[in-house]
Amino acid sequence: MKTTLNLNIGDDRWQKLLPDAKDISENVLAKVIEVVTPSFLQNKNEVLLNLELGNDAEIRELNSRFRNLDKPTNVLSFANIDDDDFVDALPDMKEVELGDIIIAAETMEEQSREQEIDFCDHYVHILVHGILHLLGYDHMEEDDRAEMEALEIRLLASFGIADPYAEKA
């Protein structure tokens, strides 16, 4: 199955923070789809993802508008599978647009510094997390959280990234 990433870099900080953002993001998308192919993607030719590398102001506005949380966050995912029209049209689709992900530069940079983890590793984790949301995974219930975290850990290991949920010594 072909994967296509539509990347928009909406904040110049990303050029310094992650100069290889496009290649890294394309590799992450391809790996997630290879490892986690939900039934709604069976028999599809192509999977598309829209990714915005933005900033705190942009994500704060979206978080406020769509989640009633007036604060920035590291990532927001807007899954097309949450739309009834999308679900109804899905059987006839050969190409599937999963939805939109936006990631905030400042929050990501602050988190990686505070958690003492490599920025790129943190980015890969957050992108994996966002894509899993677009595929229908969530972490609202304990069982769902455990399943999603296990998938994240497995996917991150395939990139040589340590378990972000492990206790630090």
Image (tube, helix red, strand yellow):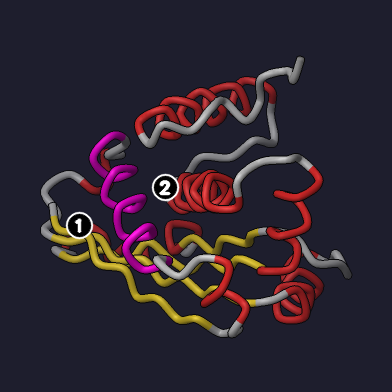
Q: Position of residue 117 (x, y in %)?
A: 66, 41
Q: Position of residue 140 (x, y in %)?
A: 69, 36
Name the residue at the right extreme. 70
Name the residue at the top extreme. 169
- For the residues labelled 2 and 1, the Cα–Cα distance comes to 16 Å
Q: Position of residue 154 (x, y in %)?
A: 42, 25
Task: Tell me the residue at 14%/58% (across/down).
Answer: 2
For the residue pair 33 and 140, the one nearer the viewer reads as 33
- Local secondary structure at mark 2: loop
Q: For the magenta stretch, what is the residue range?
A: 21-35
Disc number placed over residue 135 in the picture, else none: 2
Residue where numbered disc 1 is placed: 91
116 displayed left or right of 158: right
Task: Tell me the residue at 28%/34% (across/down).
Answer: 35
Q: Name the image quarter holding residue 142.
A: top right
- Local secondary structure at mark 1: helix
Figure quadrant of the C terminus: top right
